[in-house]
Amino acid sequence: MSTDKKQSGFSEAEREAMKERTKELRAEARLSKNREEGERVLLEAVKAMPKPDRDLAARIHEIVKKNAPMLFPKTWYGMPAYANQDGKVICFFQSADKFKARYATFGFNDMAKLDKGNMWPTSFALVKLSSAEESIIAELVKKAVS
């Protein structure tokens, strides 16, 4: 019989994300589709991030707002996300710091219209954003809501 203890269950970061999501679900009924309140909560989450995640998330927010103004800003598991009129998250930003990852991520859920053949990317690693990456993200966001 082994005496090694295996870590089982969720990590502290995962438990915290689930708590954030529970708070968000409770608030969604109250907020409904209040764009201003959703944006306020999203920007608070961005402000709480350490650099460079904060800078990346703020820039992603501007890109999404400009290229998909019909999406509703909100948080999803405590991180910036953008939902359609039905409340379904289309795209999201995941902080590197939150899960102690090597890079931040910008991703799309299955409601995004990015289908291309039998295989296509749904998330992208972000280390920094130059105008080239910003252009790619803008085009992907436009396509996702087309």
Image: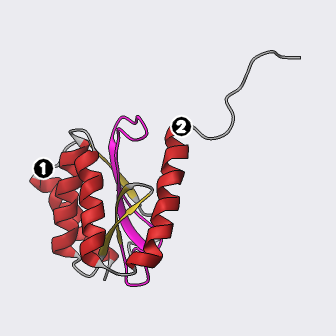
Name the chief secondary structure element in magenta. loop
The spot of residue 140 in percent (x, y) is: 28, 68
**Residue 60 to residue 84: above or below:** above
Q: Amino acid at mark 2?
A: Glu
Q: Which residue is mark 1?
A: 130
**Residue 43 to residue 31: above or below:** above
Q: Amino acid at mark 1?
A: Ser
Instruction: Please check the rendered image and state whether residue 95 is part of the magenta-colored stretch, yes or no.
Output: yes
The answer to which quarter of the image holds residue 50 is top left
From where the camera sits, is residue 58 visible? yes
- Which of 92 and 45 lies nearest the eye of the viewer? 45
What residue is drawn where x is 18% and y is 65%?
Answer: 63
From where the camera sits, is residue 121 visible? no
Which quadrant would the N terminus be assigned to in this image?
Answer: top right
Which label is found at residue 12?
2
**Residue 47 to residue 70: above or below:** above
Q: In the rendered structure, which segment of residues is drawn in magenta?
A: 83-112
Instruction: Please check the rendered image and state whether residue 25 is part of the magenta-colored stretch, yes or no.
Output: no
